[in-house]
Image: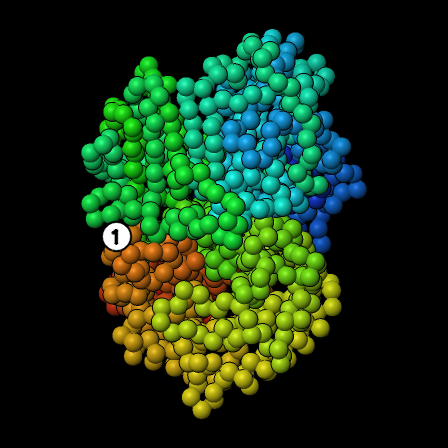
Amino acid sequence: MKKTVLFCLCVALSLFVLPDVIRAGERVTRMRTEYLEVPLGIDNPRPRFTWNIESDREFVQVRCRVSVATDSAFLTAGKPDFWTAEPADGGRMCVRYDGKRPLAPHTRYWWRVEVWDRRGRKAVSVPGWFETAKMKPADWSGVWIGDWFDKEYRKAPMLRRGFSVGKPVRSARAYVCGVGYYEMFINGRRVGDRLLDPGYTHFDKRVLYSTYDVTELLKEGENAVAAVLGNGWLNIQSLAVWNFHKARWRMRPRLLCDLRIEYADGSVETIASDTSWRYNTGPYVYNNLYSGDMYDARLEKTGWTEPGYDDSGWDRVRQVEAPAPLVTAQQMPPIRITKEIVPADMKSFPDNVYVFDMGKNISGLCRLKIRGQAGTCVKIRHGELLHPDGRLNQGNIDVYFQREGNDRSWHRDPNEVFQTDTYYLKGGGTEVWMPSFCYHGFRYVEVESDRPVEIGRESVTGLFIHTDVEPVGSFCCSDTILNRIHEATCHTYLSNLHSIPTDCPQREKNGWTADAYISLDLGLLNYDGIAVYEKWMNDFVDNQREAGDISGIVPSAGWGYEGWIGPVWDAAMFVIPYKLNMYYGDTRAIEALYPTLRRYLEYLKTREKDGILTYGLGDWVYYKAKTDASFTSTVFYWLDNALMARFSEQLGHDPAPYRRKAEELRRTIVERWYDPATGLWANGTQAAQAVALGMGMVPAGEEQRTADRLAEMIRRNGYHLDFGMLGSKLVPSVLARYGYAEDAYRMIVNPEAPSWANWIYMGLTTLPETWVMDKGFKDASLNHSFLGDVTAWMTQVVAGINYDRSEPGFRHVIFTPRFIKALTWAEGEYRSVSGTIRSRWERKNGRIRLTLTVPANVRGTLRLDRDIRLRQGENVITVEDR
């Protein structure tokens, strides 16, 4: 009887208590160090620890504790032996290491986080880990090595060394920097899947190294380590207008390497780069980032990457000069092959010519699979267009490569063709090859051989390569055209991410400053990019000259400092740290750049004329209406000072001088460029109205009038846009902000040029550089992301997902969806640093049904006619369809 009563009591309690226990609970997830999951090769002495919280009930973190130990067992036992911290701001899901004990090199550390809410409910993570690399220069055993040729020698150096492993290996790490690029092999197997490593930097200031787990590549007995080095950005041997052939850092490629082996008995051995290595040259005949790779398979040295190879005929390497004083860990995602593409079509032409259509414009390479006679020369040309006869047309992208420039003594090899890889067959069977030291931008591939070969559609595979950032966002709606614009924009963005944000993947590959920050929101809303942009901000520090100025492309070998590019472009170094702070709640980029920004603002003072800036590019690639560049330059001068005041306050510096300067500039701008009688700004263009509104220049009470004038312009122009890159970012957003989201939508999806939709109707799969292309397609890239902020507009305006400037890092998410009448539904998702945010709305029976998801430890507000406070988790709200 007692047992029966007890059982019934347990069942009754389960109905009320156990469901809460089962359903409810908190989980600490997405633990990352330096925004990377279980990373190898951390060299930051103060790494950041971040996490998310998932909960089935309301959970607001008010306290946290982060513990670091040298073994996970110490964490499990609750006795961390290295460091424990409980920060004063207990609500943040980010803590920096600030222990008195410095992190040791070559060490795996374990960490966990404990969090509590205001009710005392607690969640504990499972242990995570990170591994340090070289914490100071003395941690390197190796020296820089290279061959005995100079920088003009064309063949790539091949380096190798044999060594013995006499006992069981517990773990092994390879720390590698080979500049310009390298491929490393251990016992005949390629180390890692990184391509075009290391990332591009100012090579005379800073170079990057990568860390690999190579434990499984080693074996007891004889082993071999080998590397082949490419030129990359270090040693551009061909002429281009950016003068990389005159780069101050130009030198022969070189290698720094530590292969650190920990044995099972606890002993350590390092196989380092030193003068015991040997070198030779082989099939890597030539490589250039702008033209391509030349590879002669007849010159292959079979087995040269494997143990037992006889290298007695090879020469000893020499110790060479270090390229830069700073050698730092590459802590951003590497460049990888992310997709293999089968050609959509192939056509053959006389004289052994074949043209492949990949179906999509991409950045990357081709893998060639072919059979033919030994010595057959196969040229693989890449481009974005075809001639009317179906042959490849490179006319829109090779213009810069063909110029001679001012240095008439510099002559390009007539056999070197832009975006063309060359392969000489060794014969004897099917041969498979892909280039090692270049990448191209292309949709079409033309393969030409000087003798007949066996070739078919399967002979060429397109390889999409880019910095492998993690996707974190998405958007979709009932309008197919908007969806295709979104897809094309994201594809374009990835096509222009190769250790730096680039302007285009084919003809330039340069880090144009404005291109990058204009497309920053679309990038961060769709991809986890903080590590890439923090790396690029270091490049800005290295780029600045003594006078305080920076170049229009970063990195730069010296080109682009002439002063004509100007403050609208230079604003990248203010806007990007600000946006990283907004999206991630992190100030490290601001801290790193602050002295650089201060010097730059001192430089701008020397460029003033009558209190304004009269130089620089403004609303670049405008359609017809050119906006006054002095107006845009001075407005961005104001923005620089306004952001600098914010940064100063955040870092504990005096913001007053920058606030005063910003207010002074605002008064000057309003007095000089605003006509209160008409409500027009500057010379009355669409871009001028949007710049004034979007940048906060408009006097209080005049904002709506300014927006009304802008909407009138759009309507009078048949819902056609008439602006450049500044307008592309600001016009749609300010229209939506002041009640004209429908007008912005009609402008975006207008099927007639100029518009974003027109590109889709033209059949383009990536975004072009200009709104319309001339008949000859001269000087017009078809893969530029800087007109693509419309994709951010979809997420921020249509789906309505926005950050709160006063609570960076999406600790407060603001939903402001616009219910575009032509759409029946729309949805967006963003996995922020604080958790996953979702927004979906759909029309049904004259009402709008909203489903909004707010992550744990995040506040949410829906702003319609009034503010509606949202709870954590899923919120379903129905409103009238007006």
The residue located at (34%, 33%) in the rendering is 379
Q: Residue furthest bottom?
A: 677
- Percent across and percent down for residue 651 are 70, 60
Query: Residue 398, relative to residue 513: is it above or below?
Result: above
**The quarter of the displayed image where residue 587 is located:** bottom right
**In the image shown, does 364 or 50 lie closer to the viewer?**
364
Apparent side of residue 58 relative to residue 390 in the rendered image (left or right): right
The residue located at (44%, 83%) in the rendering is 680
For label 1, the SS is: loop
Tell me if residue 139 can be seen.
yes
- Percent across and percent down for residue 277 are 64, 19
Query: Residue 31, relative to residue 636: is it above or below?
Result: above
Q: Which residue is mark 1?
A: 763
**In the image shown, does 348 or 498 lie closer to the viewer?**
348
Apparent side of residue 73 relative to residue 296 in the rendered image (left or right): right
Give the amino acid type for the residue marked by disc 1 in the picture.
Gly
Query: Residue 116, relative to residue 602: is it above or below?
Result: above
- Percent across and percent down for residue 762 are 25, 56
The residue located at (46%, 81%) in the rendering is 681
Query: Residue 437, relative to residue 310: is it above or below?
Result: below
**In the image shown, does 300 or 13 lie closer to the viewer?**
300
Quadrant holding the C terminus? bottom left
**The quarter of the displayed image where residue 173 is located:** top right
The residue located at (52%, 53%) in the rendering is 406
- Percent across and percent down for residue 846 are 25, 68
